[in-house]
Image (spheres, rainbow, N blue to C red):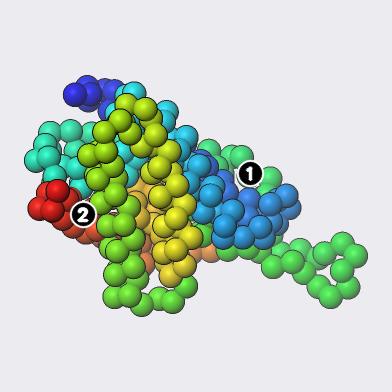
């Protein structure tokens, strides 16, 4: 049993690392004047996977490294232990916002260069500013609330149910291999299921950076799209709950 203080600190640190890597790779691929500009979806998927790897391994000794309210909810539904759920959720939200700020600072010069301006040597006109919300939070390719919700629910079940099942595999947790496998699981979800919505699969991962995006002084940052924001929160929570129920009944 982890103490409340350890859980809070561990989840802040681990989730901040997760978002630093995740928002960082999205910034690297998205923003002009980045050496990784336009390197693509495979790079983004692996960046998020490595973020899970680094964050979960770091937070593991303190909190178990949930880093995701959907995971915390699934575990609570399976075990019936709700005492520390609020501590996990609070730490995850604080960590997600901190990680978003850190990613912004890493790419500060690129964000500041995100303005319309005449292109040197370009007789045709101006560079258009890059929309920045996708660096921090998810945006669906086709805006269909029902379809988007279904995608997030299924993708989150595909995350949380294997995480719960890994706990039955003797030796994975003791060896540390479980965390490595979860990281590759996140990469796989990104590659296979991430196309429609950008695979939030984590309410804190989407909501915390969206809040930060709203307040950061990013030139030409565009909208924070709050009308969509409930889907990457509700969908993963529903998916996490379903995964906990399925695991509880089937295993």
Most foreground residue, 53 or 238 = 53
For mark 2, does the 10 Å Cα neighbourhood hold few (<14), some (14 to 19), or many (20 or more) residues? many
Q: Residue at x 18, y 57 (%)?
A: 242
Give the alpha-carbon distance from disc 2 to disc 1, as whole Å. Answer: 39 Å
Relative image position of residue 210 (x, y in whole percent): 42, 53
Residue for badge 2: 243
Does residue 63 lie above or below 44 as drawn? above
- Quarter holding the N terminus? top left
User: At numbered mark 1, what does the secondary structure look like: helix, strand or loop?
Assistant: helix
Most foreground residue, 243 or 37 = 243
Residue positioned most to the front: 170
Relative image position of residue 18 (x, y in whole percent): 45, 41
For mark 1, does the 10 Å Cα neighbourhood hold few (<14), some (14 to 19), or many (20 or more) residues? some
Q: Residue at x 34, y 60 (%)?
A: 155
Asked if one can make out residue 83 in the rendered structure from this viewpoint, the answer is yes
187 relative position to 82: left or right: right
Q: Are marks 2 and 1 in contact (CB under 8 Å)?
A: no
Relative image position of residue 172 (x, y in whole percent): 33, 34
Does residue 219 lie above or below 77 as drawn? below
Q: Earlier in the sequence, mark 2 or mark 1?
A: 1
Does residue 71 lie above or below 237 as drawn? above
**Residue 39 occupies quadrant:** bottom right
User: At numbered mark 2, what does the secondary structure look like: helix, strand or loop?
Assistant: helix
Relative image position of residue 106 (x, y in whole percent): 61, 40
**Residue 140 occupies quadrant:** bottom left
114 relative position to 123: left or right: left
Q: Disc number at residue 81?
A: none
Q: Residue at x 47, y 73 (%)?
A: 141
Q: Disc number at residue 108?
A: 1
Mark in front: 2 vs 1: 2
Q: Residue at x 20, y 47 (%)?
A: 74
Asked if one can make out residue 100 in the rendered structure from this viewpoint, the answer is no
């Amino acid at each position: 049993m982890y103490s409340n203080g350890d859980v809070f600190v561990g989840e802040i640190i681990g989730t901040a690392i997760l978002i630093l890597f995740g928002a960082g790779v999205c910034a690297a691929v998205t923003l002009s004047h980045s050496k990784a500009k336009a390197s693509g979806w495979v790079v983004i998927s692996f960046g998020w996977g490595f973020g899970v790897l680094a964050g979960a391994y770091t937070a593991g000794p303190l909190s178990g490294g949930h880093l995701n309210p959907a995971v915390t909810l699934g575990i609570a539904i399976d075990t019936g232990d709700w005492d520390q759920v609020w501590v996990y959720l609070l730490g995850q939200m604080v960590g997600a916002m901190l990680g978003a700020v850190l990613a912004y600072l890493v790419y500060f010069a690129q964000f500041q260069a995100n303005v319309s301006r005449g292109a040197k040597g370009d007789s045709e006109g101006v560079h258009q500013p890059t929309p920045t919300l996708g660096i921090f939070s998810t945006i669906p390719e086709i805006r269909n609330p029902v379809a988007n919700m279904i995608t997030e629910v299924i993708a989150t079940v595909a995350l949380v149910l294997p995480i719960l099942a890994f706990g039955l595999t003797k030796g994975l947790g003791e060896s540390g291999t479980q965390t490595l496998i979860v990281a590759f699981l996140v990469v796989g979800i990104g590659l296979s299921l991430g196309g429609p919505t950008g695979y939030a699969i984590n309410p804190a991962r989407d909501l915390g950076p969206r809040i930060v995006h709203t307040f950061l002084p990013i030139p030409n940052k565009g909208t924070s799209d709050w009308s969509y924001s409930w889907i990457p929160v509700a969908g993963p929570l529903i998916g996490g709950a379903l995964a906990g129920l399925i695991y509880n009944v089937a295993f």
